[in-house]
Image (cartoon, grey):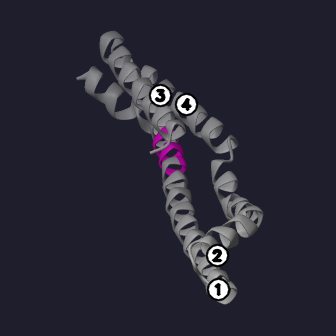
Amino acid sequence: MTPHEKRAISLAVAALVLGFFMAVHWEAGHWFARSGALVTVVAVVFASLQLRSRIAQSSGFVDEQLNRAHGALLKQAADAGLDAEQAEEAVDRVAREARKEVGDVAQEVSRRLYLVELWLFIVGTLVWGYADLPLDWWFAK
């Protein structure tokens, strides 16, 4: 989990817990509903960081680094006793594996970031819009 995800989830949970305790303390459900607004703000800020688009750029970064290192990798392969064709095949295999691994990780992280963003919006919006109703009913009893 990235530090951004940890921070966003921690802020959201803290806002919800604090809002709930304030609602119970003052017997006013609107305090909990306001915490939902704060969770929605956290979701907006989290989404505005555009972390998923940054992750999507990782494949270009990997290609750039592999292209820069191509000559050095060929030299190391040749120093290890491989002929030019074997060295080229070895470097290509490493490049393919690196691209695949980075692509798989980027896809997994992007999906997780999307889910965190989505759930922050859903929870924040539902709490903001409806959390005061059951609490006010409970306090009225």
Q: Are marks 3 and 1 in contact (CB under 8 Å)?
A: no
For marks 3 and 2 on the same chain, the one whose residue lies earlier in the sequence:
3
* Along the line of sight, the residue nearer the viewer: 55 or 31: 55
Q: For the view shown, which residue lies furthest in the bottom direction? A: 85
The image quarter containing residue 4 is: top right
Q: Is residue 25 left or right of residue 129?
A: left
The residue under label 1 is 83
Main secondary-structure element of the magenta-colored stretch: helix
Q: Are marks 4 and 1 in contact (CB under 8 Å)?
A: no
The residue under label 3 is 11
- At mark 3, the secondary structure is helix
The residue under label 4 is 37
- How crowded pointer 3 is (Cα within 10 Å; few <14, some 14-19, many 20+) is rated as some
State the extent of the magenta-drawn residues as a range.
Answer: 117-124
Quadrant housing the C terminus: top left
Q: Are marks 1 and 2 in contact (CB under 8 Å)?
A: yes
Residue occupying the point 45% across, 23% down: 30
